[in-house]
Image: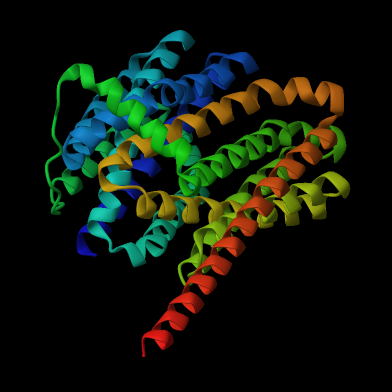
Amino acid sequence: MTYFRRLWLAQTVSVLGDYLALFAVQVAIAFRMHGSARDVAGVFIALLAPGVVLGPLAGTFADRWDPRRTMIASDVARGLLILLLAQAATIPRICAIIFAVSCCSSFFAPAQSITVPLLVPRAGLLVANARLQQSMQVVRLASPAVASALVAAFGERICYAADSASFFVSAALLTTLCYSRPPAPAGPKRAVFRELGRGFHFLLTDSRISFVVLSLTAGTFAAGCFGALASLYVRDVLHRGPAVLAMIASLLAAGTLAGSSVLRGCSGDPRRLIGGGMAGVGASILLIALVPTTAAALLGSASMGMGVAVVMIAASAMLQGETPPELRGRVSGASASFTSLAQLAALALAGMASARLGIRGVFLVSAALLFATGLSGIRAAQNRARRCQSECAEGNRFGRDDN
């Protein structure tokens, strides 16, 4: 587990830097450049779009390459690119740099997904992913105050410098990792798309993996709709101000942190955990839609964060544990592509849907989607448990007959 701790520390450091830089970018666009809502949305589109297009292909190459070297190269490239933000004087240039950084991140994520099972035994994957998720939420809670203080004291450039330094620190930590992994055959370049197709075929035909990816996609879309409309819900439904919106964001992060802590001591069928987590998120959004009060919004946000933690951690553990080692990069990249697409779809569709259904109507549809997906996961876990009991009973019967 020593090497996993180094991977965990590398991620924690670089994620902190990412949040600092993203905060600085939003401050620069909103307050210094006086950008519009469309300009801010453009940054998030530049952040998400590479994952949709490049994710599966990056996962295919991650399966071919050494994952440690891939992560190090990604960190070094991002560390250099982030420094360009200090000289970016226009919003299109900022978006272009964010797009390039996100392209490099598309290679890091599948390489990390390959690495975790190499450092942690299969039985420890749930705990390992809980620890990774937990540290991310701690950083998410702390980073706004840190970033705000740094920007107020030194300006935006200090956040870009900190993010760049975090990538180089992460790369240095990753150079110390040691694991055993048989080298993957490189194969001809023209075989890349054949390998990519093999990854998609496995993802779509294996019922366990397709359920995980479907759950992540549906959950990301529903949560994305909530995130896109949360500020309008606070303003137009609750008739409250930015302080309540900030409390909702903080409680979401705190709930995710609490869920990560609880899940570190849990075990069981990941499909049951995913199904229960999806149903929990759906119940939280349903509460917020049906009871338009500040107290309900705060309670629902905290419980939603706990459900999100359960889904993300159980899904990551299941993808890493159930996917054949030679396909982990492709499956991880394809999963990231679907979830990024769901986030983009939520950003694009939530506003239009709210014009027809109202904000609370969109929340009700999101809750129904989450309940349907969650119940299918719980049912799948129950069917698997029945099959296991039947097979065990059949095996015992044959054992007695042999005797």
Residue 63 pos. (x, y %): 24, 36
Work out which residue is located at the far bottom of the displayed protein and give it: 403
Q: Quadrant of residue 254?
A: bottom right
Position of residue 360 measured from the top left corner of the image (x, y, whole percent)? 84, 37
Coloring scheme of the render?
rainbow
The residue at 58%/30% (across/down) is 342
Q: Which residue is drawn at the image coordinates 15% and 54% (left, top)? A: 179
For the image, the number of numbered tags is 0
Q: Is residue 257 above or below residue 204?
A: below
Q: Residue 325, how many percent across, how many down?
A: 27, 47
Q: Residue at coordinates 77% horizontally, 31% vertically from top-left?
A: 232
The image quadrant where one finds the C terminus is bottom left
**Up/down of 127 relative to 27, above or below:** below
63 or 127, nearer to the observer? 63
Instruction: Decide if residue 19 is in sight here.
Output: no
**Quadrant housing the N terminus:** bottom left
In the rendered image, the vertical position of residue 21 relative to residue 98, given as above or below = below
Q: Nearer the viewer, residue 2 or 239?
A: 2
**Residue 189 can be seen, yes or no:** yes
Residue occupying the point 41% across, 22% down: 50
Question: Is residue 101 depicted above or below 274 in this figure?
Answer: above
Q: Nearer the viewer, residue 299 or 210?
A: 210
Give x and y (percent) for residue 121.
Answer: 28, 64
Drawn side of residue 62 relative to residue 317, left or right:
left
Asked if residue 79 lies left or right of residue 400, the reply is left
